[in-house]
Image (cartoon, rainbow, N blue to C red):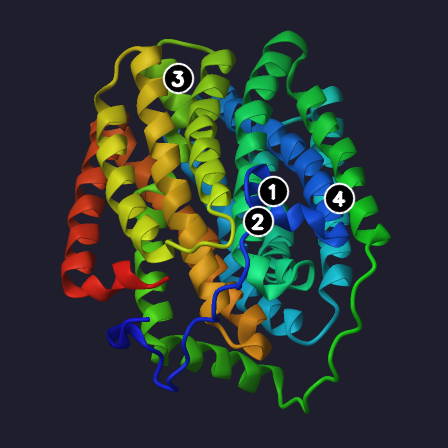
Amino acid sequence: MNEALESPEGQSSPPQAPSQPVGWRRTFVALGQPNYRLWFIGQLFSLLGTWMQSTALGYLVFELTHSSAYLGYVAFAAGAPTWIFMLWAGVIADRVPRRSMLIVSQVALMLCAILLAVLVFSGMIRPWQLVVVAAVLGTANAFDAPVRQAFVNELVDRQDLGNAIALNALMFNAAVVIGPAVGGVVYAAFGPGWCFTGNAVSFLGVIGALAAMRLRAPPPAAPRVSALADLRQGLVYVARHKSIRVIMILVAAVTMLGFAYVSLLPAFAVKILHGDARANGLLQTARGVGALSGALYIASLGRQRRSGRLLALGSLLMPIALAAFATARTLPLAFGALVVVGVGLTFFFNNANALVQTLSDDGLRGRTTSIYSLMMFGLLPFGSLGMGTVAERIGEPWTVGLSAAILLAFAVAIQLMHPALRKIE
């Protein structure tokens, strides 16, 4: 690894595996390990339901309020709890069994889906209730996200961690392709209540998979200081590790200026493209098609690692494609632009995640991934709130286009200042 981005302790990335499977086995090498296979199948079903719910929730908010700003309020409510809980979740993830934490968080998310279904079917649904439920969902996700990221390391051998993370992205984006499209059709045909019901049922798959796993006994726990001292140790570690610090800065910028556009898709579907719930589902699916393609390419590398180059490429490709989306006025053009946005986002976030995990010390991985998750999920509501507020004044296309231009300039500046980032493998 280039010395310019070496950690202060002289830590370098793990050596590559001596052997590399061939053909399709290289793409799906991590699925050869039983625990990861259970995780993959269970999560796939759960994520299908999650994206059905996410698509239905966003469109229901817009249908009830006809307000882009209110879309931002709901997104903010969903993301704000990450600032309160996510870093502490990382501390807990380094202290207690991660499988137990995941089961608790999945049950909480399932109960939220049940509540949404009951409110819709009873006719009692109101916009303020969606804000409250979004906040509860955000709290459960604040504990779930960093644990889920760190848990993958317990399911595969270290040499297959990069492939497992790529397959996670493949699984996630397969759900993005199918879930929103199904959610849009179900919403239009039967209403949002059935989208929420489908999500509630889908959690049974991942809970069952977690319960069925046979995990290795954890290593003896190191003597623990206070939780606050553990948290401080994780923050100092990230601040002093130059490679991880630069990646975190880029993740923060991409999240706020790039990924936050998702909250405006329902408004784009209706106001700019003159569509309905089906158009909203197709826009969500378009990003998923691109992301799925990008994830499949990364997974096909198997144990090869091109993380720095793909991360840099994604940080440039995504804002360029997002600017093209801002100019689209027909559904096919918008669909095509979002496909490329999805490729760029996957190249960036997948490799950022892989690098953060492989560069982190084992005893600090939960805390490091919690900081990474905070940069993604914690900053997303601020980006969503800002985009929603600005869109009310200057319109959705100008808002997205301006954000894309600023992000592109920032990504270019980071790469000029830290050229060694592209060389990290």
Q: Are marks 1 and 4 in contact (CB under 8 Å)?
A: no
Q: Secondary structure at mark 3?
A: helix
Among numbered discs 2 and 4, the one appearing first in the sequence: 2
C-alpha gap between disc 3 and disc 1: 40 Å
Residue that mark 2 sits on: 21
**Residue assigned mark 1:** 25
Q: Which label sits on residue 285?
A: none
N-terminal of the pair, mark 3 or mark 1, is 1
Query: Tags 3 and 4 in contact by the CB under 8 Å rule?
Result: no
Residue at the location (30% across, 52% down)? 309
Q: Which mark is residue 206?
A: 4
* N-terminal label among 3 and 2: 2
- Between 73 and 150, the one nearer to me in the picture: 150
Residue at disc 1, secondary structure = helix
Q: Nearer the viewer, mark 3 or mark 4?
A: 4
136 shown above or below 368: above
Number of the front mark, 1 or 4? 1
Residue 357 visible from this viewpoint:
yes
Circle 3: is it few (<14), some (14-19), or many (20+) Cα within 10 Å?
Answer: many
**Snapshot quadrant of residue 272:** top left
What's the distance in space between the residues labelled 2 and 4, CA to CA? 28 Å
Check whether the beta carbons of the residues at disc 1 and disc 2 lie within 8 A of each other: yes
Q: Which residue is mark 3?
A: 269
Position of 228 relative to 395 (above/below): below
x and y percentages locating residue 83 in the rendered image: 49, 61
